[in-house]
Image: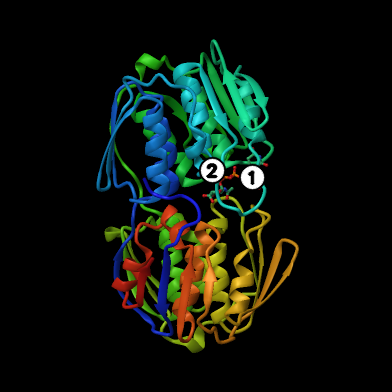
Amino acid sequence: MAHFGRNSEYIRMEGKKPLDGRLQIQGSKNAALPILAACVLIPGKCVLRGCPCITDIECMCSLLKSTGAGVEHSGSQIAVDTCSVREYRLPEKYVSAMRSSVVLMGAVLGRLGEVHVNYPGGCVIGERPIDMHLYGLEKLGAQIWIDGNHIHAYADELRGAVIDLPFPSVGATQNIILAAATARGTTVIKNAAKEPEIIELCKFLNMAGARIDYAGTQLKAGRIVIQGVELSKLRGIEYEIISDRIVAGTYLFAALAAGGKITLENVPIRQLGSVCDTIRGMGAEIVIGEAENEMTINACDRDRITNIPYIETDVYPDFPTDLQSPLLVAACMAKGKLTVREKIFSSRFRIVEELRRMGAEIAIEGDTAIVTGGRELEGRTVIARELRGGAALVVAGLCASGITTVADSGFIRRGYQDIAGDFTKLGARISYGE
Ligand code: UD1
């Protein structure tokens, strides 16, 4: 079993070498996790292709097994047979390790009518309450009892409802979709999240027999309408997981920061609009090959790489919070100043301290970071404290003079299947150590 927390693994690299080469982007973590959870709802066998080989996926597979599901994992293919799912108590060890485990609530409740779970864990990037998840499940008729750190939810019958979310939370929208898919009657989620991973979950469930209207005018209005179907109407299917927009974005920012020219294959091009706008705005050239899902970034001419004045993270299609840390690193390497406002998670500037130790000039004022670029970064030992921040420290190491060691790099394996291998393919001098 893989580790999910602190660890002795590190990544070491020698920086200041422009990137060069081609790379295939892995499958999407944030699409695969809720779809794996959705398998619990479907009495039958689902086969998912294109899953990333990362520890969060291993953790979800362990959670599925704990419910009684049969899980066969071979390379990027995962087969989940849920015919004998009976256990509604989810083990704390795995739930605490990963925030995304929370979406199993809706799926297990829909399948078994009951779920016992502790408050989920995840990255230390700020307060991550689940009040909207619980509100949605209660509106669908679930009785919820909270006992210390434990949540017990049950329902003799889930019933469709109109649920107006105060914020378009990705996780709460997913949980409500899962619980409503087999509820009696119609559920309308207002102010629903519109992230591509929500669309993928709806597509997957509809292929399996659910009746969810999420497209066109509904999507524009931020509404998702779910006509509940009987559990017995759902059937196992085969499904291909989309590629990972955040991993693709991380590597684009790596090229912008370290310089060079790289081509990424299997890129979800349409999901990267705000990211490409930002990168182009900072002076790099991006060429898109729609037919081959390829994207080439050219950041060789360093004189052209200049900060834009301001950017803020927000819900899709705006700039994703998950790419805020790699953006900070790229801003350190560009000329001029960038002001970044983090609107989604309160503590997402934890890497700033580490970047300052490397020589970066970054001031923090509440939810805003002001980066003065054009400073030289120097290789140091820095500590990864969470997934995306950890990946961004690797990017910083590629830009720094001398040797950088990113300690506790096991966090990065939660979302990147082989970050050192990928950067090696792009010509970097980088390796894992233990
Ligand atoms: C979030 C990101 C998602 C990203 C994922 C992993 C957004 C909108 N969501 O999804 O893109 O892939 O992290 O890093 O960018 N909140 C509440 N109560 C709740 C649920 C959420 O107050 O019950 C608040 C959170 O504290 C946060 C915001 O809503 O400020 C966004 O949360 P949400 O979209 O639910 O987070 P995730 O589903 O984890």
Say which amino acid is labelled 1. Answer: Arg
Q: Residue at x 68, y 55 (%)?
A: 346
Identify the residue at image location x=61%, y=41%: 168
Q: Respond yes or no on whether mark 2 lies under 8 Å from ligand 1.
A: yes
Pointer 2 or 1: first along the chain? 2
Q: Can you tell which mark lies on residue 128?
A: 1
On screen, residue 407 versus residue 172, left or right, reads left
In the rendered view, tell whether residue 120 sits above or below residue 182.
below
SS for callout 2: helix
User: Which residue does the image show at 49% across and 25% down from the upper left?
Assistant: 89
Q: Which residue is mark 2?
A: 99
Q: Nearer the viewer, residue 8 or 306?
A: 8
Q: Quadrant of ligand 1?
A: top right
Can you see residue 281? no
Q: Is mark 1 within 8 Å of ligand 1?
A: yes
Of the pair 265 and 5, the residue shown nearer to us: 5
Image-based side of 22 in relation to 213, left or right? left
Residue 157 at x, y percent in the picture? 54, 11
